[in-house]
Amino acid sequence: MRAAVVKVPGPAESLQIAEVSDATPGEGELSIEVRFAGVGFVDTLFRAGAFGLPTPFVPGIEVTGHVREVGAGVSEFTVGQPVGALLNDFGRGVRAGGYAEIAVAHASMTIPLPEDADLARVAGVLVNGVTAWMSLHHLARLRVEDDVLVLGASGGLGGIASRLAAVHPASRVIGVVGSDAKRPFVADECTDVIVGADLAAMVDEMTDGRGVDVIVDPVGGELRGQAFERLAPFGRLLVLGNASGQDRALSGDAAFYGTRQVMGFSLGGVAHLVPDQVRTALAAVVGLTHRGVLREPAPSVVPLTDVAEVHRALENRSASPKTVLAIGA
Ligand SMILES: NC(=O)c1ccc[n+]([C@@H]2O[C@H](COP(=O)([O-])OP(=O)(O)OC[C@H]3O[C@@H](n4cnc5c(N)ncnc54)[C@H](OP(=O)(O)O)[C@@H]3O)[C@@H](O)[C@H]2O)c1
């Protein structure tokens, strides 16, 4: 099969299109003829060697396509059926493998799709949608009276988190972007937009000094520290990523005296521990997207051969909110 392979982790150029052995399913798994594979910021970290995947490896943690073969013990899927799958259940051992003509998924991380599903759009909502759903609902326990602040609102995870919070509905969803040029990428569902530099003053103005109840943070760095200071009593900071490349120490006293909660969530680290929650989230996000309730914009669709270019764009902050690779016919 054809795949984008990393033999030596490094810059975007280390992604090379090559012929490799077909992936085959083991017990509890199925193989998928991949139609579309989503690309996210985290893929750039895998490619660069941040998580130490054994080489050579094929990145890509979300795909849509059609079932090719089912492994032993898998009875709920049939060959040819359209499906969407997460390939980031790393707790079961090594996975990923989405940038390929054939990918292998665990059955519990796979959901059937309607025959008329938009496979490109669905491929673009799987990882970010499940992450946003589980962190907003299971961790933050979002309430209708909550004001939500979304950092990195122009990106993939920030975008879908904004829309999910809005359809909940949360009382207010404030999107934060790095520059005026990113304003057009913020979800229409956001009630307000802040350009990063004005964060503290703007949050105070918008909330009459009360602060926000939930912060969705896939960015980290200085922005995380500023946002944490604007968290209202009983507020929840969802630490979901570090697109800025900078971690940041948070004050225990600020959490204690402010009665604020810091919550981390890593889908790839826990997916295998809570498969029922993952499947519920997958079904919810895909169902809401398919019905148009979650108005996810169509992703940019590019050929597999453009994958290095997409990685470069993610790293220099010029990428579309979401890109998917078109792979099989
Ligand atoms: N917890 C989980 O399970 C989980 C799941 C999915 C993703 N993630 C993480 O969430 C983060 C975002 O992923 P994504 O796919 O949504 O990425 P993305 O589409 O590239 O969005 C990231 C956003 O962060 C902002 N940003 C601020 N500083 C940045 C910098 N120095 N470099 C790049 N972006 C910067 C950018 O917005 P502006 O330019 O407007 O500032 C960008 O739109 C990543 O760290 C990823 O690993 C975590």
Image (tube, rainbow, N blue to C red):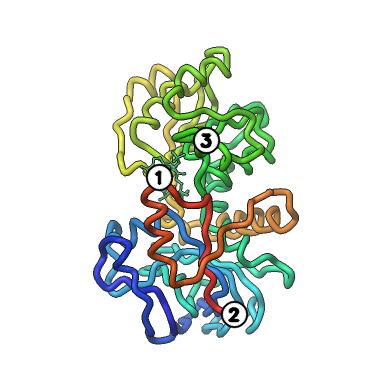
Give the percent coordinates (x, y) of residue 294. Answer: 68, 49
Quadrant in which the C terminus appears:
bottom right
Q: Residue at x 44, y 48 (%)?
A: 318
Closest to the camera, between mark 1 and mark 2, is 2
- Please, which residue is most extreme toward the top here? 208
The answer to the question of whether label 3 and label 1 lie on touching residues, with beta carbons closer than 8 A, is: no
Q: Which residue is mark 3?
A: 150
Mark before the other along the chain sequence, 1 or 2: 1
- Disc on res. 241: 1
Asked if labels 2 and 1 touch by Cβ distance under 8 angstroms, the answer is no
Give the image quarter of residue 2.
bottom left
Q: Secondary structure at mark 2?
A: loop
Near-viewer residue (66 or 323): 323
What's under tag 2, amino acid-wise? Ala
What distance separates the C-alpha of mark 3 from that of mark 1? 12 Å
Residue to which mark 2 is pinned:
329
